[in-house]
Image: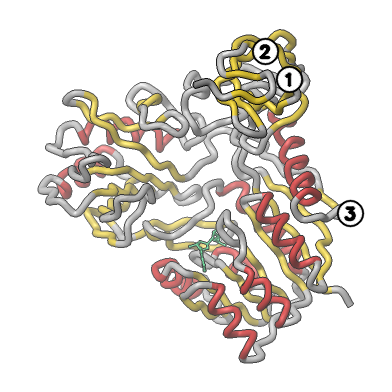
Amino acid sequence: MQQKINFLQVGDIEEITIGGMGHTGEGIGRAEGVAVFVPGALPGETVKVRIDQVKKNYARGELLEIIQKASARISSRCPFTKACGGCHLQHLDYQEQLRHKREMVLSALKRIGGLENIEVLTTLGMDDPWHYRNKVHLQVKKDGNRIQLGFFADGTHQMVAEVAKHKCLLVHEKMNQIMATLQELINTDSLSVYCWKRKEGLLRHVMIRRGYRSGQVMVVFVTSPEEWPGAKKLAKDLIARHPEVTSVIRNINHQPGRAVLGRENHLLAGEESIMDWIEDLKFKISASSFYQVNSIQTEALYGKVLEYAGLQGDETVVDAYCGIGTIALFLARHAGEMIGLEIVEQAVEDARQNALLNNLTNTRFYSGPVEKLLPQMASKGQKADVVILDPPRKGCAREVLNAVTAMQVPRIVYVSCDPATLARDLGILSKMGYQAAKVQPVDMFPWTSHCEAVGLVVREQ
Ligand SMILES: C[S@@+](CC[C@H](N)C(=O)[O-])C[C@H]1O[C@@H](n2cnc3c(N)ncnc32)[C@H](O)[C@@H]1O
């Protein structure tokens, strides 16, 4: 039976004027009094839509025709952009994307955080917003006897952009070449593809990461624990074709879930890690460690973090969610003491070695969940002048915010990849004796709807 809200039904053809944009880049208009989300439509456009989903409070529609075009509409460069889930905004002029991302942050801060008077600066964009990604995750699928490597359509297991035929415009050109070689090589080995239904077979994903300044490349084959006799030969053949590949790793993922990486890494060829630089700091990056995917914008982002930290040289700084210690070391040169906290043990190991590599002896790194480590520091009476919070998308656990406020930290710099959780957490802090002073959006992910931002939060006197 068809679902119905008021007079709107699945299959209806509607003419809609788009007034806004959703957080994953869909145009939003109204039909029969109901909000309709239309992927591919832009604010200011009048579009013809087929309603394909009707829910209690909203509907979704497929864009059939653009009756009146927005002046910000441009032609997508990538022929797969509509099908592949990677880019949501290739049809929107880049300067408009930057404006839209600022609006997203501003609106979340008001709506979710209740922060009416906060200053949100103009988004820091890129001069050349293409080929910026230093990391890619490839999906693997069997097509008859052939193994395909590439990208699935958004939310499906349907391969829409095979790397053998398609170059991704977001990743570095060298990585595109390596991707094409990999597709060829995995078809010469007797590799089986992991089947998610039957939970058998070998290859699950391939991850590639390239140091932006070093040019060193790591290739990670994510597999089940099954025997893989040809693994080392494949790694050797890859390096013979691409000497810039300096690390080939087999990651074993036993879990049935969709998380890409498992906990075990085995070296197949080359080194365990790759090296890279952020400005003049050198970093060792292991397969399981987080590393920002847009190296050019990382320098802009960390520059903002340094500015907002307002260091004079003798402060104690805590870098919570520190990864391999990139922000910690970027700031340690300007601080008295730096304490890094991170849950992934391998990343903490990398952070310690990175401190040594850069002769930064005023640093300590601890492994564990921030929601345990920071309350422990607070209960021991540890003081900090500045705390950097750079959590994953879900934001900070309440215990983390409680600990920061219990420590009476004068200055918090909050780095976020999700405006909604940024707004939630700044809203909470603003009810705990803090003032959210300003937020700087930084475009780390051009052509996608993802948005990074740095917020400065200061303790009220
Ligand atoms: C957005 S990344 C930021 C890393 C680093 N600041 C950077 O710029 O590269 C978030 C980091 O938090 C770590 N993480 C996730 N949950 C955590 C938790 N509960 N406690 C400590 N670290 C956590 C992740 O492993 C990851 O390294």
Percent of width and height locating residue 312:
77, 76
Mark 1 and mark 2 in contact (Cβ < 8 Å)? Answer: yes
Q: CA distance from mark 2 to mark 1?
A: 9 Å
Labels 2, 1: front one: 1
**Which comes before the other along the chain, label 2 or label 1?**
2
Residue most extreme to the bottom? 380
Percent of width and height locating residue 62:
57, 18
Labels 3, 2: front one: 2
105 lies left or right of 239: right
Q: Label 2: few (<14), some or many (≥20) within 10 Å?
A: some
Look at 66% across and 68% down and name the residue there.
388
Labels 3, 1: front one: 1
Q: Is residue 88 above or below residue 443?
A: above
Look at 71% across and 40% down and name the residue there.
101
Query: Residue 14's mark?
Result: 2
Residue at disc 2, secondary structure:
strand
Q: Amino acid at mark 3?
A: Asn
Query: Residue 32's mark?
Result: 1
Query: Residue 198's mark?
Result: none
**Within the image, what quadrant is residue 179 found in?**
top left
Name the residue that disc number 3 marks. 117
Percent of width and height locating residue 94:
69, 30
Q: Amino acid at mark 1?
A: Glu
Q: Label 1: few (<14), some or many (≥20) within 10 Å?
A: few
* Residue nearest the observer in this picture, 299 or 142: 142
Q: Is residue 265 above or below residue 100?
A: below
**Which comes before the other along the chain, label 3 or label 2?**
2
Q: CA distance from mark 3 to mark 1?
A: 35 Å
Q: Is residue 90 visible?
A: no
